[in-house]
């Protein structure tokens, strides 16, 4: 993640963190409970703003905060910097807040992915491989005509699977 690099490995890790937003469906910005948005966080927030991706703020280490009211200052500082889709005080050590965070992330991801049914001919192994690597397969059935699958897809995969789509939107 973002930190002040003290080695070539540190430089590489910061570069990866900066560049990683390009290949994701959702951004989770993890910060410590400090009521100040630092320069690295401001840079990441700007990348989030430019990406137009859903984003949640995770304020970690809440088990180290003496007064829970102190979290309000942290929430206020980050809320002023960006309009996050959710703000979650969490503790990775005690697992406080993680269930709510994970449920929200799941809802956000599913809100912009479509649930469709596709029938992929067995002769199209490339598309089947892509289905398993890039989609969330909910249910599958092997039929005489090919693989029948209920999947959650993003827009790009929906377009690639268009010729195989049986049902456009499953409720």
Image: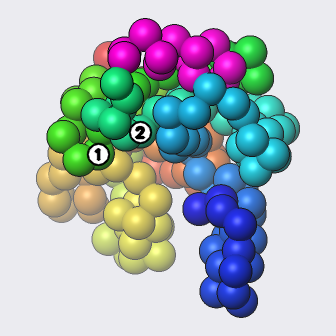
Q: Residue 2's image quarter?
A: bottom right
The residue that appears at 75% across and 41% down in the rendered structure is 38
Residue most extreme to the front? 66
Please tell me whether mark 2 sits on a helix, a strand or a loop. loop
Q: In the rendered view, does 81 fall on the left or right side of 75?
A: right
Residue 171, percent from left and from top? 32, 17
71 left or right of 101 in image: right
The image quadrant where one finds the N terminus is: bottom right
Tell me the magenta residue range. 67-78
Q: Is residue 82 above or below residue 3?
A: above
Q: Is residue 71 magenta?
A: yes
Residue under the image location 28 percent in, 34 percent down:
63
Between 99 and 125, which is closer to the camera in this rendering?
99
Residue drawn at (34%, 36%) of the image: 64
Res. 60 mark: 2
Residue 129 as seen in the image, left or right of residue 51: left
Per the image, the residue denoted by label 1 is 92
How many numbered marks are there? 2
* Residues at discs 1 and 2 in contact (Cβ within 8 Å): yes
- Reply above or below: 18 against 91: below
Q: Nearer the viewer, residue 69 or 77?
A: 69
Measured as percent of width and height from the top left, residue 19 is found at 74, 63
Looking at the rendered structure, which numbered label has been put on residue 139?
none
């Amino acid at each position: 993640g973002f930190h002040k690099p003290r080695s070539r490995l540190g430089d590489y890790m910061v570069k990866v963190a900066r560049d990683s937003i390009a290949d994701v469906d959702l951004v989770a910005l993890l910060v410590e409970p400090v009521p100040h948005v630092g320069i690295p966080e401001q840079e990441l927030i700007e990348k989030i703003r430019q990406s137009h991706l859903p984003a949640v703020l995770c304020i970690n280490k809440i088990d180290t905060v003496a007064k829970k009211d102190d979290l309000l200052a942290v929430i206020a500082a980050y809320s002023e910097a960006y309009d996050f889709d959710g703000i979650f005080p969490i503790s990775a050590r005690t697992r406080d807040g993680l269930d709510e965070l994970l449920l929200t992330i799941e809802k956000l991801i599913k809100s912009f992915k479509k649930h469709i049914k596709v029938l992929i001919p067995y002769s199209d192994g490339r598309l089947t491989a892509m289905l398993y690597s890039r989609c969330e397969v909910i249910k599958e059935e092997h039929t005489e005509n090919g693989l029948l699958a209920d999947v959650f897809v993003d827009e790009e995969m929906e377009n690639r699977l268009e010729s195989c789509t049986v049902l456009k939107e499953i409720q």
